[in-house]
Amino acid sequence: MPTLDGPAATPQAEASGRVGSGLGAITTATVVAGAIGYVILALVPKFVTDPARYLEFTSFWSGLYLLVGAVSGLQQEVTRASSPKSTEDGRSAGGLGRLALASGLGMAALVGLSSPLWARSVFAERPVPLVAALAVALVGYAGVAVLSGVFYGLKLWSAAAFLTIADGVLRLVLVMTALLTGLDLGMVGWAVALPFSLALGLAWLVFGRRVRGRYRVDVGPAVLAGNAAKAVGGAVALGILTSGLPLLLSLAPTSESKAAVGALTFVVILTRAPLVVPMLALQGWLTVFFRDRSKARLRSLVRLEAGVLGVSALAALLAFIVEPWLLRALWGARYLVDGPTCAGVVFTAGLTAALCISGPATLAAGRHSAYLFGWAVAAALTVGMLFLPLPLVPRTLLAIAVGPLVGIAVHVSALSRIPAR
């Protein structure tokens, strides 16, 4: 793994411009990477025709990205802490290379040591190569998260976009090569895992000179590690509220039919993504946005939240009118859900999106404990309320509304108690 630490360079780090100027590049990179992921998931069944083998692949893919989502908290904290280093600034770089290596190895060790408890049931045919690939992927992604965080912190938007796209393109090339040459599913897992490390090395070769010795970190290594742990904890809770929600719906006891649960889960997956996924993709950008607005952070947050909730209300109205008809037209009666439920799912998705904005604002203000507490309370309330003895739809809507609302309240309360700086 390339080191991020090095001798200080005299010039201040080059930045690619204002915070707003990076939105287009980051959005484009996110769309490209997301599209590549969809292409891979759509093409794998063409080559892996055995349902058991395909389930093993999807288990590896979903498990990997659930863990990647947790480790992504590293990126947010490094983004917050990193800024250009001036000629007068003597503060050390903060040991980011060591943080990346320690975090990656720690996650890999956790996966490896725990694998005897779950590997055989999850990866029935190829537990050893897939567990190994998972561990190597986490080491590589920890480096990606830290380097990407430095890119964001220095506003090197083209570098951050390059790293995102390079990772996706390399994965598409390697996975397609493995599938076309008929390699074993274990090797396909390695094709999914290796691009993190390859993209990290490539991005360092291209942009390393603009990073090495040209940034400062606003806290020492011990505090940085503690802050990063809280950010990772928040990212775990975020994963529960987003990618973990369909799983929770399937696990919660209900007297309703499996068809009803399946229909609601399908609507949740289908209609929450347009509001939630963009906010997830912009976590690094939002952290820089709020970090650079210390004197108007709360006011900027209120404006963004009002905009997201306004869009969510309009989308909910549209869903109330159109979505039941659309569901019936495209998928028949199998996934039929009434208008009020569709509207409720869409509007509560807006609340989760709003929580994805208040989180970076709180983190940017250095309120790491409040950041973690807001996410943790939101996740705990959502999970707990999904298991209430209520009908399926009311309890689901209540859970995915109350959890994010309380989380937002925690974040806003923390921000309102600190002076502008």
Image (spheres, rainbow, N blue to C red):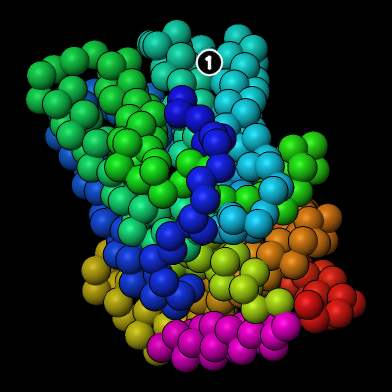
Answer above or below: position of 113 versus 217: above
Q: Quadrant of residue 228?
A: top right
Q: Position of residue 251 (x, y in %)?
A: 62, 44
For the point 30% across and 77% down, the residue is 326
Bin the neighbour count of mark 1 within 10 Å (Cα to Cα): few under 14, some 14-19, many 20 and up: some
Query: Is 153 rendered above or below residue 132?
Result: below
The residue positioned 51% from the left and 76% from the top of the image is 346
Q: Residue at x 51, y 30 (%)?
A: 3
Q: Which quarter of the rendered picture does the C terminus lie within?
A: bottom right
Circle 1: residue type = Ala
**Observer-nearest residue: 378 or 271?**
378
Residue 303 visible in the snapshot: yes
Q: Is 420 left, or right, of 4 in this rendering?
A: right
Span highlighted in magenta in the image:
295-318
Identify the residue position indicated by label 1 in the image. 119
x and y percent of residue 263 in the render? 45, 60
Nearest to the observer: residue 373 or residue 229: 229
Q: Is residue 310 magenta?
A: yes
Q: Position of residue 393 (x, y in %)?
A: 61, 68
Compared to residue 136, the image places residue 116 above or below, namely: above
Q: Main secondary structure of the magenta part?
A: helix
| Residue placed most toward the observer, 28 or 317 | 28
User: Viewed as shown, does residue 166 lie left or right of 396?
Assistant: left
Residue drawn at x 78%, y 70% as measured from the top left: 411
Going by the picture, which residue comes out furthest to the left? 180
